[in-house]
Image (spheres, rainbow, N blue to C red):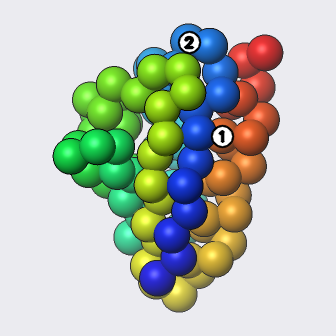
Amino acid sequence: MVEKLLTVKNRAGIHARPAAIISQTANRFESEILLIRDDISANAKSIMGVITMAAGYNSVIKLQAEGSDEKEAAKTIEALFESKFEEE
């Protein structure tokens, strides 16, 4: 299992567009990918799950990936957060 702490760096937080990007990206991998914020956990492959996390600007999210391509999955999703979902 790979775990990473990610910070939401785009000012609008994770709204519909970033959630769609996260879920589309996560669905390219076979690994199970979870995003955890406080007590809320969401399957990264579910756009609704990601949106319901209500992660605003500067929220810290734990990413957990487990499976055959876990390292690549974690690295790719981390890059989305680092690029601010190409919104800024």
Residue found 48% across the figure and 32% down from its top? 59
54 relative position to 21: left or right: left
Please, which residue is most extreme toward the bottom here? 68
23 relative position to 53: left or right: right
Residue 29 is tagged as none
Residue found 44% across the figure and 66% down from its top? 64
- Answer with mark 1 or mark 2, whichever residue precedes in sequence: 2
Q: Position of residue 45 (x, y in %)?
A: 39, 51
The amino acid at mark 2 is Ala
54 relative position to 15: left or right: left
Badge 2: how crowded within 10 Å, few (<14), some, or many (20+)? Answer: some
Residue 45 showing in the rendered view: no
Residue 77 showing in the rendered view: yes
Number of numbered discs: 2
- Residues at marks 1 and 2 touching, judged by CB atoms closer than 8 Å: no
Q: What element does badge 2 sit on?
A: loop
Q: Label 1: which residue?
A: 81
Badge 1: how crowded within 10 Å, few (<14), some, or many (20+)? Answer: some
- The quadrant where residue 48 appears: top left
Q: What element does badge 1 sit on?
A: helix
Residue found 77% across the figure and 35% down from its top? 83
Q: Label 2: which residue?
A: 12
Cα separation between marks 1 and 2: 12 Å
Q: Position of residue 30 (x, y in %)?
A: 48, 74
Residue found 68% across the figure and 42% down from its top? 80
- In the rendered image, which quarter contains the C terminus? top right
Q: Position of residue 81 (x, y in %)?
A: 66, 40
The amino acid at mark 1 is Phe
Please, which residue is most extreme toward the left here? 39
Query: Which of 4/24 is in front?
Result: 4
